[in-house]
Image (cartoon, grey):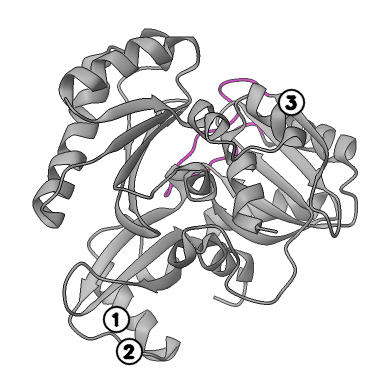
């Protein structure tokens, strides 16, 4: 566990318990954040003190260079990814910095677990989580990094948001940063970093596409109620709306059964020019539920400041979410 402290910090810093808006510890956040997505690298740098955006950059890499996976090697063409990463980090002036590194959702498995009783000490909690999840992840317990956070339960007992990853996969991404003289002080999945963009004053679902990955998350007043990652049968350009509906409807039905209420909103991210088509499909499947784009909704609600407009225009939801996660 000590070999990758950045991963452990990742989920704690997502701060779901405070509606994903503030940090849970007193340590300073990195001023530079970098997302490695399935087909590009994006990075941003904020000014110390004011935390206004200083600069950001995006660089693509070949579509087959990265294969997001919780089990197998991710960096198929590490040189191409490193070149893109070096380009954006040099542009934003990140040399010698500690950075926040966001990785594809496939790398980090996230679970919301319920316990009647849950230990306070890490020495007791980690073995309990390993035992509970040993059949839920495709790698051995001794290879697993675990991060967890308590949150308010829907019933008596304790709910624990738990993230797991395979050590050697995490080391691939940390190694990229280290090869450039950087340290990944925070490491977390892209969708967890994105969640602060979601207005969760009522039960809200985020459906986020990145490459062929679909992640659905339900948040209600700062509580992560459900989280699911799946691989879609096709890229967005040829994806049929029915394939999306088949994935998100079971999550919505689970929430309704577990919490005895329906969703109020569904917000979509990563759908590009097909946003309206998929929005209409979801509206037809979940009547009475408001369906809209994640970034446009945050803009309409005045939650994206003027200096962040470039990130919004380029649909860099992870970097936008991270900026809100840091808080003022």
**Sequence-wise first label, 1 or 3:** 3
Q: Is residue 326 left or right of residue 11?
A: right
Badge 2 is on which residue? 119
Q: Which residues are magenta?
A: 61-77
Q: Is residue 66 magenta?
A: yes
Disc 1 secondary structure class: helix
Mark 2 or 1: in front is 2
**Sequence-wise first label, 3 or 2:** 3
**Sequence-wise first label, 2 or 1:** 2
Q: Position of residue 25 (x, y in %)?
A: 62, 76
Predominant SS of the magenta segment:
loop
Q: CA distance from mark 2 to mark 1?
A: 9 Å
Q: CA distance from mark 1 to mark 3?
A: 41 Å
Disc 2 secondary structure class: loop
Q: Which mark is residue 59?
A: 3
Question: How many numbered discs sit on the rendered protein?
Answer: 3
The answer, for residue 81, to whether it is visible in the render is: no
Badge 1 is on which residue? 128
Q: Position of residue 6 (x, y in %)?
A: 63, 65
Crowding near the residue tagged with mark 3, few <14, some 14–19, many ≥20 C-alpha atoms within 10 Å: some
Disc 3 secondary structure class: strand
Q: Are marks 2 and 1 in contact (CB under 8 Å)?
A: yes
Q: Is residue 197 above or below residue 268?
A: below
Q: Position of residue 150 (x, y in %)?
A: 37, 74
């Amino acid at each position: 566990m000590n070999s990758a402290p950045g991963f452990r910090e990742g989920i704690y810093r997502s701060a779901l318990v405070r509606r994903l808006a503030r940090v849970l510890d007193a340590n300073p956040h990195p001023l530079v954040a970098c997302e490695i997505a399935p087909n590009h690298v994006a990075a941003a740098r904020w000014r110390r003190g004011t935390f206004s955006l200083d600069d950001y950059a995006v660089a693509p890499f070949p579509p087959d260079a990265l294969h997001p996976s919780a089990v197998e090697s991710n960096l198929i063409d590490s040189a191409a990814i490193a070149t893109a990463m070096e380009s954006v980090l040099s542009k934003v002036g990140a040399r010698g910095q500690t950075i926040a590194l966001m990785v594809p959702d496939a790398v980090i498995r996230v679970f919301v677990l319920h316990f009647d009783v849950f230990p306070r000490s890490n020495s007791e909690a980690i073995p309990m989580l390993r035992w509970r999840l040993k059949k839920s992840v495709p790698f051995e317990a001794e290879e697993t990094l675990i991060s967890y956070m308590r949150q308010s339960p829907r019933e008596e007992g304790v709910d624990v948001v738990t993230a797991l990853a395979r050590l050697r996969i995490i080391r691939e991404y940390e190694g990229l940063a280290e090869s450039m003289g950087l340290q990944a002080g925070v490491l977390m999945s892209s969708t967890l970093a994105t969640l602060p963009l979601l207005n969760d004053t009522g039960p809200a679902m985020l459906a986020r596409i990145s490459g062929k990955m679909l992640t659905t998350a339900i948040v209600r007043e700062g509580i992560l109620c459900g989280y699911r990652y799946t691989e879609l049968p096709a890229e967005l350009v040829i994806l049929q709306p029915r394939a999306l509906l088949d994935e998100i409807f079971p999550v919505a039905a689970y929430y309704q059964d577990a919490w005895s209420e329906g969703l109020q909103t569904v917000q979509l991210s990563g759908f590009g020019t097909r946003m309206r088509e998929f929005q209409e499909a979801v509206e037809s499947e979940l009547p009475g539920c408001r369906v809209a784009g994640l970034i446009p909704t945050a803009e309409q609600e005045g939650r994206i400041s003027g200096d962040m407009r470039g990130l919004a225009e380029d649909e860099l939801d992870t970097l936008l979410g991270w900026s809100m996660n840091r808080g003022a």
